[in-house]
Image: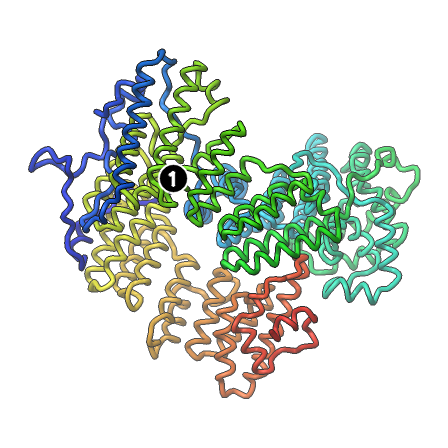
Amino acid sequence: MCASRTTCLRCVSRVRSTVPPTYKSAFRVGAGARPVAWFSSTAPGASHQTPSSSSTSQPPFPQEAPASSKRQPRRTKDADAAVSLFNDVVQKNEATARGGSPARPIARQHSAPAVLGEWEIAAKMKELETMNVETLDRLRLFQNEIWPHVKELRGRIPKHLYVSTTTFLAQTCDAVAQQGLTGISVALSKMLAIIGKWDLHMRNQLVLSLCHTLISRKHTSAERNALVDELLDMWRHTSQLRRMSQLHVERLTFVLPTKEEIVEDIEKCSASSTRQNESAGLKSSNMTPTTKALASIFTQYRLEQAGELVPGLLTTLAVLSDPRLAREASQIKAAPLLDLVALALQHQPADAAHVDGIFSRKIEFPPSKLADLRSYVLPQWPRAQDMVLRTDAAWREGSIPSQGPSRSSSEASHLSVFNKQLRSAYRSRNTGAVVSIWQDLKACLAQNRDIAREMREDPDFFDYWIFVWCAVRRPTMLQATLDLMREVGIQPTVRSYTNMMYGWKICKDADRIEALWNKLVQSGLRLDVFIWTERISGLIEAGRPQSGIQALAEMQSLWKKAVASRGSIESAARVAVQPSTEVVNAALKGLIVLDRRAANEVLVWAGRQGIEPNVRTYNVLLRESLRNNVAEDVQGLLKAMKNRGIEIDSATFTILLEGLLGSLEHASAAEQVHVARQILGDIEAAGLKANHETYGKMLYAVSGLANGGANEALAAVQDHMTAAGLSITPHMVTILIERVISRDPLPPDAGAAVRAILKEHGLSDVAQGDQTLWERVMSAHAVTGDVASAMAVFDDLARAGRPVTSLPCLTDLLKALLASADPKAAQDARHVVGVVLHHRLEGAAADDSSDRDARYWKHHFWFLARENGLVDWRQVPVTVAAKLRE
């Protein structure tokens, strides 16, 4: 990350409206001494450090947490007792350790690499976007530096990270198709699946790319075999998608329906084409019977979704039937898939006209390459049909019954829908909705007991329920969840109990945290570092710092005893848990707000134990220093980070930026410019190069000041960025446009200002920039009264297949149309509502979602549409109509 290491605060302190900090360190040794010495090497326990730690000139943790110049809150008896108890426990434990038999020296602890938070991940994603590297190198960087952290957030990934990650992976798929890259298709598909991106057009794109590479380039025999194997692996992985039974299965294998199920689906399609069209939605009505038959192979998807795989499937058949490209051994490997294709084509034959029609449809693939594939598949199709339908074909010796029941897809989608609804209800703090979702889950389980099997294959499904019931104080429902787990054959795990503690930490129920811990200890269950961390931080944040500190000391004591008795760290790890930096950080985060003196004691103690600080440790201390207006502390912390080689991350820069520029609310333009230039100058002085993320944050922070900040300050940031050779990004342009229309009152020349910004940065078409930018541009045109330009942007985005989805922006457009005196405005308003409605219903069908979350339909946009008679009720399904009329 390219971010600031040090930031000068002297210039900021001069323009602060508050009184300069009066804090003086108790550790100054004379009038000329420097501020607080943040690290100490003379701690009482230093003699018990390992040679590596005792010889280090800077012990690990800061000696002092930030003190405040403001009046400190009155210390409670519990807070004083917490410090005394901590000292008593630690001193007693260390005395015991000194009096006992000497243990093998313990090496300085090196904590595992910390899992990045969402801000850090977002910063890395932004930096990756700006790198001028090849696609494979970019993907390798993503896999090594970002993906492990995104994967950790699976199931709770914030929307902005989900969007940026899926956008990156989708763009990589496009690059693979454009450049004909190989060897990464399955990895891309797996990453998309892990974060819940099931779109089959991307898999079809990857399949077509592999096929095009096979037919258009010369390869050695080994290279051809590897490409065909990759192609078959793509089909294996695609067959495993959206099947809960395959969630934790690493091995690629075909998981397909039985022949009976395929025949049943084909007969249903043939029996009533009209009824099938109605149930399949907008897309399936245009599907031929042959396409439906081939799509029915992938029963975990709706027909119109699975239909997106048919072009890739037909091309794969052509490749496998071509002896120049594929051997009989490859056909045998594909036998499970070929067996079902043969069955589908026996019931619904595919002639050359059908194949030509498939390739005439809109397919997301480079047009020139798609034309190549079409020219290859059409003459090859008779041979492909013969390979599939011939009863004595060599591949049939590899035909085996398909694995696993295919109908698990419906249950899998049920669980995912319930999980999505639960998370949404909890985020909105709607306990009533949570209870209702639970009742729906119980009813669904009662109607279909096969869901119990899916629950057993996904035991983590219940862990989030456990957390929610604890967080919203519903012990009765928690017990009901545990009872249901027992009923379906699932035992709570340590992770389940960790979620319990996390929930009780949210609602600050320390009694239940302690009670659960005591039961777990008595049970003899092996406890991990995560549940220890939740216990310690939960007790502190629930208002019991005394108990939390005691738990931390207990954790270290048990670890030392285990090392002393077992003789090695490896053996000790089997019976105890070693305190890590993250455990200390979790304690520090809650403790520093309640009692800085106790936080100081914990930091000094951690240093004596050889526990290294990391950037998160300093972020906690920096935030507290800025909150309390202690400039000297911030300077000392930044210097300590630099001396220890701890690089500032995006979160650190955000903390500094918000703390510094946030104090300039009423500063003059000259003062804002001075501070902005000083921050950028300090970044350069530290030997670092500001990146797009840095400049974007500065623009956002300045524009967030009173009345949008000073024009001079924004110009100073942009001029500095231009001088550094960086161009402005769509995100930055969005910030500038939103700044214009957020002023109150709206300037009379706001519309001209928006157009000037777009012209200045060469943005004249929706093909430039990104979706967010143009949605905000549309909104800005509407707000400033330029309805014609707003409609032009709306229509351009719709024609580009990227219709506007932001309801606030759409509301701005609809309000402007309703207020317009133009006779055409009413027709345009109906058009806008129709496009949005169609896109929403089409998206819901593609996602296989019942869309039970009624909040979308309760947005003010739909209220305006309904009240002004803009909804064409003939387009609206009954269930959606009921929500719109509520």
| Image quadrant occupied by the N terminus | top left
Quadrant in which residue 324 is drawn = top right
Density class for disc 1 (Cα within 10 Å; few <14, some 14-19, many ≥20) is many
**Residue named by callout 1:** 586
Give whichever of 497, 753 is nearer the camera.
Answer: 497
Q: Residue at x 62, y 74 (%)?
A: 834
In the figure, is residue 13 to the left or right of 313?
left
Residue reaching furthest left? 31
Please tell me whether residue 672 is drawn above or below residue 247 in the rendered image: below
Residue 371 visible at all: no
Towards the viewer: 412 or 793: 412
Location of residue 275 by image quarter: bottom right
Whether residue 157 appears in this view of the structure is: yes
- State the quadrant of the C terminus: bottom right
Image coords of residue 124 (percent x, y): 43, 45
In x, y percent, where is residue 841? Answer: 65, 66
Question: What residue is rendered at 67% in x and 44% in y?
Answer: 455
Check disc 1 and give the amino acid type.
Ala
x, y percentage for residue 882? 65, 72
